[in-house]
Amino acid sequence: MEKKPCLWIIIPCYNESEVLPITAPMFSDKIEQLVQEEKIAPDSRILFVNDGSKDDTWEIICRLSAENPRFQGICQSRNRGHQNAVLAGLMEAKDRCDITISIDCDGQDDINAMDQMVEEYLNGCEIVYGVRSSRETDTWFKRTTAQGFYKVLNGMGAEVVYNHADYRLVSSRVLQAFADFHEVNLFLRGMFPLVGFKSTSVYYERHERIAGESHYPLKKMLALAFDGITSLSVRPIRMVTGMGVIVSILGFIGIIWAVVVALMGKSIAGWASIVCIVCFLGGIQLLSLGIIGEYIGKTYMETKRRPRYIISERTEELICDKKA
């Protein structure tokens, strides 16, 4: 009899006390359904990663774990961001399961897409990306900025799957290889394509958030995009170099023109042209220094090799302590 894969669903949580009691049973029901259909092993689990929540998210996770052994949880020592929370869950699960599916707990991603993800894994795919089929539920501004987000990333050389966030199936085989990636500046949706292995995409409709507030406003989306570009591509540095060459050529032409005009005796004193040139060159220099400084800062953080996450508590340990 063919062995069924053990699935762990990885769910990062940050201040999700409103939505977690609603979506947790949904994830449990999905696991039970897949087990009943004999697609996954009975010992499959749901792992919540508490990312330093300030509300009672961790208390809810502990209660869920005490009530149902299928639920497990780990708590980070402080808030370290969504990407580090997902990574913590994946690394916690990589030696204890055959496949993982990472998904947010807000109910926006269609959990029924997991059925096809598991099917694709059984057909030989090691990574299955969950991709939004449309953005009709988004506002015009959200849709435009999100689509621009992916286009800019791809244009800058960051390899990302269009309209894919962090809803994906990843096999333990891929995770073992991914563990060798030691970057501190994480952009998971651009890093997994670098690992390789056979992959495919599953398309689904994304829903409105069931409860609570979004933790990814425009400001965070822009920061994530900039992190993705500077973590995965050196194209901005090359753009600075190209811009410097163009400005230098224009400056050289300007010098020749100024000398010719002076020799012809047609030059007149004027401050407007000088101010424009100085402001233009000053802006270019500051922009270039800022981009270069961003790369230097990331290099500085990488050389420190600080831990990307620190787990302070596990529900398994709490349950064992109570039994003891």
Image: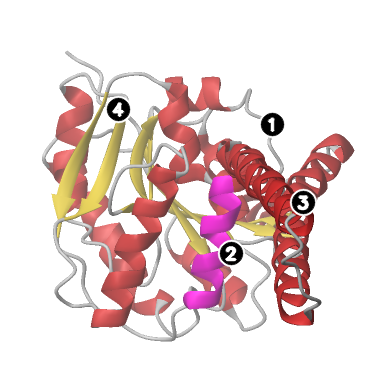
Name the amino acid type tagged 2.
Ala
* Mark before the other along the chain sequence, 3 or 2: 2
Amino acid marked by disc 3: Val
Residues marked 4 and 1 touching at CB (< 8 Å) = no
Closer to viewer: mark 4 or mark 1:
1
Identify the residue position indicated by label 4 in the image: 5
Q: Alpha-carbon neighbours of circle 2 within 10 Å: few (<14), some, or many (≥20)?
A: few
> For the residue labelled by badge 3, is the local secondary structure a helix, a strand or a loop?
helix
What's the amino acid at mark 4? Answer: Pro
Question: Whole-percent x and y of residue 165?
Answer: 37, 54
In front of the other: label 3 or label 4? 3
Most distant residue in the left direction: 37
Name the disc covering residue 283, or none.
none
| Magenta residue check for 225 | yes
| Residue bearing mark 2 | 223
**Mark 3 Cα shell of 10 Å, populated few (<14), some (14-19), many (≥20):** few
- Disc 3 designates what residue? 259
| SS at circle 1 | loop
Q: Nearer the viewer, mark 1 or mark 2?
A: 2
Q: Which residues are magenta?
A: 217-229
Query: What residue sits right under mark 1 in the picture?
Result: 182
Separation (CA) of disc 3 from disc 1: 55 Å
Measuring 38% from the left and 33% from the top, which residue is drawn there?
170
Q: Is residue 107 visible?
A: no
Left or right relative to 280: residue 126: left
**Camera-side residue: 261 or 230?**
261
